[in-house]
Image: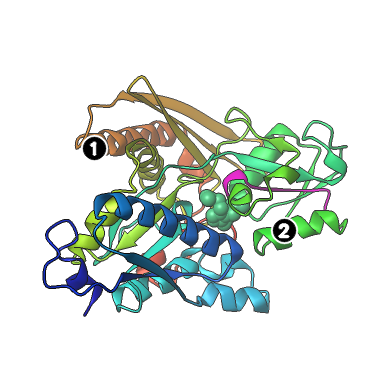
Amino acid sequence: MTVDHQLDNLFGILEGLDNKPIVLRLGTRRSELATTQSRWVADRLLEALAVACPQRGFQVELVEIVTSGDISQAAGTPLTQLGGTGVFVSALREAVLDGRCDFAVHSLKDLPNAQPEGLTLAAVPLREDPADALIARNGLTFAQLPAGSVIGTGSPRRAAQLSALRPDLKITGIRGNLGTRIGKVASGELDAVVLAHSGLRRIGRHHEVTHLFGPEQMLPAPGQGALAVECRPESASLLAALRLLDDRASRACVLAERALLARLEAGCAAPVGALATIENQVLTLTAFAGSPDGVQTIRRTATARLLGDPQDEQVANHLGRALAEQMLDAGAALLIPVPDPLPAADEAVAREGDS
Ligand SMILES: NCc1[nH]cc(CCC(=O)O)c1CC(=O)O
């Protein structure tokens, strides 16, 4: 019996079904971060189902999907030549679309701007800390790094903001998974690296952080720290189950950030940061765009009052687009490179390095 059929009665009467547990197949990449994120979502889903559907047993089976990005990482191809992190996302999406698995978990910041045909963003679970973090040699904080220190980052966004804060630092490209990048500090190859705090927390290496960048210093990538859970809309019961994991505030924030990015038509080399927060039902969005050397920078903030579901999606999208217009009026288009032609339309925008 297919999962869709098994789940048809998920919230109803389970007559006619045998007592075997329902197995949900979660497609995941092999990296430590990807499997940790997938397991975290699996555990939250099983918890939610135990409450929503206590009569029934459930299991989540992790299905490993190898992506072209993982293969070429081993071969050492720079990510910018692969069409950005979209390469990691599309293989997982294909696996959901062709039925090798039932759902998938992505780092939301790695998703291209357009939602592909045939897949639904079922949930944005509670967001981790979106901040960027420094791991420097000998426990040095950002302010303590001597002039001329060599900082590794593959992200034009981090490079632009680092250069704006400390023009005396040297920035060098770097890729590889989180462990590989941290290893370059331990080995002495680099004085420091800048990574997402969320990723470090998920793999349990946040104790090595020597400085956390505040939003006034460095704005994260749109969607950083958030996960995206995707399934086919036809999997109605699974979709209903995954919706239990959705966090409305996290969803509104990342929608605003990504609407801004989409309106800026920013490609994988875009030095664009954005962060939305909610306080007292007011959504505040701040964005940054800068030249790679950090000499030219544009920073703007806008706010909107949230109205509650279901209007909040519109409010968030509108705020993101409106702030993008302000950024464009201030000349942001000149700071954003035109994206390279990419292998597939659904990979049109991707940023950053590998997870
Ligand atoms: N750049 C790749 C990437 N994609 C997602 C994360 C983890 C952070 C997140 O949860 O958004 C990372 C690592 C990083 O940016 O250092």
- Above or below 219: residue 179: below
Q: Is residue 97 left or right of residue 221?
A: left
Tell me which amino acid carries mark 2: Arg
Please identify the quarter of the rendering in which residue 294 is found: top right
In-front residue for pair 322/118? 118
The residue pinned by badge 2 equals 181
**Image spot of residue 315 (x, y percent):** 26, 33
Residue drawn where x is 30% and y is 74% of the image: 97
Which quadrant: the N terminus? bottom left
Q: Amino acid at mark 1?
A: Gln
**Residue occupying the far top of the picture:** 280
Percent position (x, y) of residue 335?
53, 44
Residue 292 appears in view: no
Q: Which residue is mark 1?
A: 314
What kind of element bears circle 1?
A: helix
Residue bounds of the magenta highlight? 189-198
Indicate the secondary structure of the residue bearing disc 2: helix
On whether ligand 1 comes within 8 Å of the CB at mark 2, the answer is yes
